[in-house]
Amino acid sequence: MGGMGVPRWGLVVTVLAVVSVGAVNAGTASAATVKPRTVLVQDLNKVRRQFGLGTVRPSSLLHLVALHHSDDMINRDYFSHTSPSGRTFGERIISSGFVTGYSWIGGETLAWGTGTLSAPVTTVKAWLGSPDHRAILLSPRWTRIGIARACGRFLGHVGACVWTADWVERW
């Protein structure tokens, strides 16, 4: 699917399939030591709980899939679910081994921004402001997620961060 610009915020988000998002307990760590992906999962789960939904849990395998995709988008300067060489979201999930031996459904949400526009809270707000993304975040179906971000020069913007959130339900 194509991207959707939010000019007022300067944040760009895009979505593939219908999906939702993951959680981690902050414990007693200070905000300065919590990884941005952990904060994003916490923020997403906070929203899910506000709507009476269960939380989602991060998967280390899905995190690696998301991290590779965010890194690839930064390094090759593109914003899409499909790489310039044609590798798709589905191919990335299958090759990770996370769904080996399972039936599965999944989706991927992307976002990018600079400065505070790349922060987890801003990303959640932007996704909630989009009907497609809101449906994903508030879907009761999803229980696992891999989240990652990569930062650097992106599409001509210095200090940009690119988020990838990969959701998978397997049975």
Image (tube, rainbow, N blue to C red):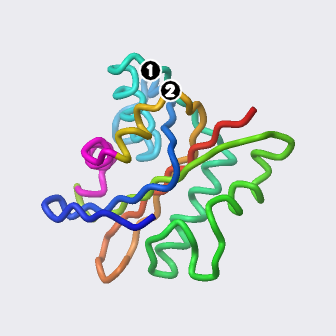
Q: Quadrant of residue 89?
A: bottom right
User: Magenta includes 123?
Assistant: yes
> Looking at the rendering, which quadrant does residue 156 occupy?
bottom left
Q: Is residue 54 above or below residue 41?
A: above
Q: On the image, numbered disc 1 is attached to which residue?
A: 53
Find the magenta span and give its range.
117-131
The dot on residue 140 is: 2
Q: Is residue 108 magenta?
A: no
Please tell me which residue is depicted at 49% across the width and 25% down the height of the picture. Answer: 55
Type of amino acid at the residue the image marks with label 1: Leu
Quarter occupied by the C terminus: top right
Residue at 71 percent across and 36 percent down: it is: 170
Q: Amino acid at mark 2?
A: Pro
Residue that appears at 77% across and 45% down? 99
Q: Residue lying furthest top in this view?
A: 52
Of 77 and 140, nearer the camera is 140
Residues at circles 2 and 1 in contact by the CB criterion of under 8 Å: yes
The quadrant of the picture occupied by the N terminus is bottom left
What percent of the width, then of the height, locates residue 146?
57, 46
From the top left corner, tell me how far across and down residue 44 is, in percent. 39, 34
